[in-house]
Image: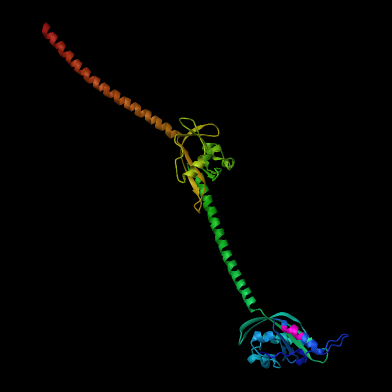
Amino acid sequence: MTEKRSYKDRGLWSKRTDDKPIGSYQHSLFADDIVETIREPLLVLDSNLKVAFANHSFYRAFNVNPKETEGCFLFDLGNRQWDIPQLHDLLAQILSRDTIFENFEVEHEFKDIGKRIMHINARRLYRKTGPDKFILLAIEDVTERINLERELFTYRNHLEEVIESRSQEVVAINKKLLEEKERLKITLRSIGDAVIATDINGKITFVNHAAETLVGWSQSKAMGKPLSDVLILIDETSREHFSNLAETIIESKGIINTIRNAILISKDGSERIIADSGSPIWDMKGRITGAVFAFRDITEEKKMEGNLRQLHKMESIGTLAGGIAHDFNNVLFAIMGYTDLAMLLCDNYLGR
């Protein structure tokens, strides 16, 4: 246990001289109570930089005792472990200029307690009687706080670097996605088949050039409209309208041929026979986000197929007629042969 000595024992306090004096002993006890309550280490040096007083927090913090501290030259304490160049500069300025320092940072490797970072508040003290001058050093150990701040600063810098790197990656990915999206749009607008895409609610989000030509709607005017308002399809035989195309495609969850024998009615009322297929649109997370409907005009193909079927019918009829004629010729040939033979017999019988 360290020896407890009052300010009076160290000669740091004198009797007050105001109108309501307090006894020096009482005053010392009062000062001791205050000083010993302070959690930060306190050190009082005389004008020769010898330790005149240290509180209990100082002894606990730096693992020393009063016998090896009080009356000793500051820079000789603990095998000169307080011989710190920063502290030399600090005390020199206080002694020469009466300067007050707050949060003067000192970082030093101590023999017993290791590397510590301290904030020192320093100022001059004066006795009311006598020429002695003292220096008060209030020492705050901020090692953990500073280390934490440094770790946080390092971590923040690392985090900022990571964020910057990720941001650059995101920018690059977004740029690539935009380029791919633009390339896809150009491709879709350039292909011969008509393509119309919708969102999950069946509202049109894309119309390529071929589709604009067939349906009679420009992409700018078709955007946001329900698919059934732009793509009007009827059954070739029953003339019944088809509806809910986008819903049918989305519910299918695969590529389907949505309509057979379909006729597309353009905005101007013209009709075209089409072949079609549809598929849901999937995002990278495997969620359906819309539908795409692809179709092409096969009106001319249908006409050519009809003409070809007519030619095949005519060819079949010609083949049948040729066969019948051949068979008829065979019969006629036989009849004519028998007729010639009969006439010859008649001529012989009549003696011609």
Whether residue 152 sits left or right of residue 88 in the image: it is left
The magenta segment is 31-36
x 53%, y 54%: residue:
177
From this view, report whether residue 336 is shown above or below residue 79: above
In the rendered image, which quarter contains the N terminus?
bottom right
Q: Position of residue 169 (x, y in %)?
A: 55, 61
Whether residue 230 sits left or right of residue 252 in the image: it is right
In the rendered image, which quarter contains the C terminus?
top left
Colouring method of the image: rainbow
User: 326 and 100: which one is in front?
Assistant: 100
| Residue furthest right in the image | 19
User: 234 and 131: which one is in front?
Assistant: 131
Q: Is residue 104 visible?
A: yes
Magenta segment's dominant SS is helix
Q: Position of residue 200 (x, y in %)?
A: 54, 46
Whether residue 161 sits left or right of residue 89 in the image: it is left
Q: Position of residue 270 (x, y in %)?
A: 52, 31
Quarter of the view holding residue 44? bottom right
Q: Is residue 93 visible?
A: no
Quarter of the view holding residue 127? bottom right
Quarter of the view holding residue 29? bottom right
Q: Position of residue 213 (x, y in %)?
A: 52, 38
x 25%, y 22%: residue:
326
Let me know if residue 6 is in the magenta part: no
Whether residue 39 sits left or right of residue 231 in the image: it is right
User: 122 and 337: which one is in front?
Assistant: 122
